[in-house]
Image (spheres, rainbow, N blue to C red):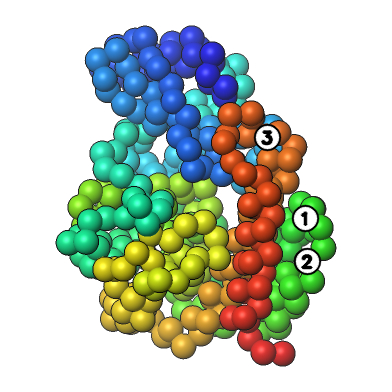
Amino acid sequence: MTEGIDDQKVHEWLIANVQDLQGPFTYERVAGGRSNLTFVATDAVGRKLIVRRPPLSHVIEKAHDMAREYRVIAALGSTPVPVPIARGLCLDRAVTGADFYVMDFVDGFVPHTEAEAASIDDRRGLSRNVIDVLGDLHDVEPRQVGLGDLGRGTDYVGRQLHRWQQAWELMKQRDLPAMDEVHRRLSAIVPPQQRIVIAHGDYRLGNMMVDADRITGLLDWELCTLGDPLADLGYLINNWADEGEHAEWSSAPTAIGGFASRTEMLDWYGDRTGLDLDDISYYRSFAYWRMGCIVEGVYARFLQGAYGTDHGENVSSFAEAVVRMSEAALEHAPTP
């Protein structure tokens, strides 16, 4: 039995609910996911599907809502946003102990690291496509795709500051004064929100399936809600290292060179959307701070065994990353 998957019961569910499959199936855990668990299910003739489910324990219902994530992917299937085809949602926890959903496997690769970066000839074109896809997502009218009630939309940053500060207090494994100071500064002056959009919440190369200079699948929608477009942009820019730079969290494939610079990415997005980017440093601080809260939660769940025993992670690296992100957030935060 694959940890997190009841092979026989999931087999029966797939055969009953997804067309044109032939059992038996093999299941392989996908490395890299640090919240929900992702598996590749391969049938007897080589057809591949993706199965997503919550962690094995210490599940926060709102943070690991499979039905919500599935709903977003299914709704965006009719838009220019490249998402995998949604195939089915299982809310019967007797099948494998948790809700899960199934979507198509998308060909390509995920550029997690410099070693996995796109070829030199594709990097600049991919850079532009990253901005174009973000613009396409932010152009989607939520009500037209049935997502008008996905979130409140207004005062996104203010509500996120409140939500994640509460989560921080519950999950933190130590005191980090920088996190509290950043929260204080960000809460004091929140820029006016220019638009309400479908915000991905984790928009970076590590959540994109790529083929040459195009995104073939935008993945990991668990943080998606209606919100502020510049929150997505600030987060992307934090993860978009210029050549030779070091990212504060995880690897930075763009640091290898050949990709567009941060400045170019911002210019392209500004031209694409017409939004005022004068406060982008604020949004970068917010993105670092929020990710610090999220990663502290991941660190806590690792310590509690929520990801099982076969995760291959250096758990202490999560604690160190939160410290670096708190420092980066403080660097970009508004002056008191």
Amino acid type for the residue under numbered disc 1: Lys
Q: Nearer the viewer, residue 174 or 119?
A: 119
Amino acid type for the residue under numbered disc 3: Ala
Q: Earlier in the sequence, mark 1 or mark 3?
A: 1
Q: Quadrant of the C terminus?
A: bottom right
Q: Nearer the viewer, mark 2 or mark 3?
A: 2
Query: Compared with residue 226, is residue 20 higher up or lower down, i.e. above or below?
Result: above
Judged from the image, the secondary structure of the residue bearing numbered disc 1 is loop
Query: Compared with residue 20, is residue 274 higher up or lower down, i.e. above or below?
Result: below
Q: Earlier in the sequence, mark 2 or mark 3?
A: 2
Q: Residue furthest right?
A: 175
Q: Residue furthest left?
A: 121
Q: Nearer the viewer, residue 123 or 332?
A: 123
Q: Residue 25: tell me if it is visible.
A: yes
Q: Residue at x 40, y 71 (%)?
A: 244
- Residue holding disc 1: 172
Left or right: 162 in relation to 219: right
Amino acid type for the residue under numbered disc 2: Leu
The crowding category of the residue bearing disc 3, from other C-alpha atoms within 10 Å (few below 14, some 14 to 19, many at least 20), is some
Left or right: 318 in relation to 215: right
Number of callouts: 3
Query: Compared with residue 108, is residue 41 higher up or lower down, i.e. above or below?
Result: above
Q: Are marks 1 and 3 in contact (CB under 8 Å)?
A: no
Q: Quadrant of the N terminus?
A: top right
Question: Residue 176 has which mark?
Answer: 2
- Residue holding disc 3: 306
Q: Are marks 2 and 3 in contact (CB under 8 Å)?
A: no
Q: Residue at x 26, y 39 (%)?
A: 107
Gap in Å between the C-alphas at discs 2 and 3? 24 Å
Gap in Å between the C-alphas at discs 1 and 3? 16 Å
Q: Nearer the viewer, residue 144 or 137?
A: 137
Q: Residue at x 38, y 66 (%)?
A: 255
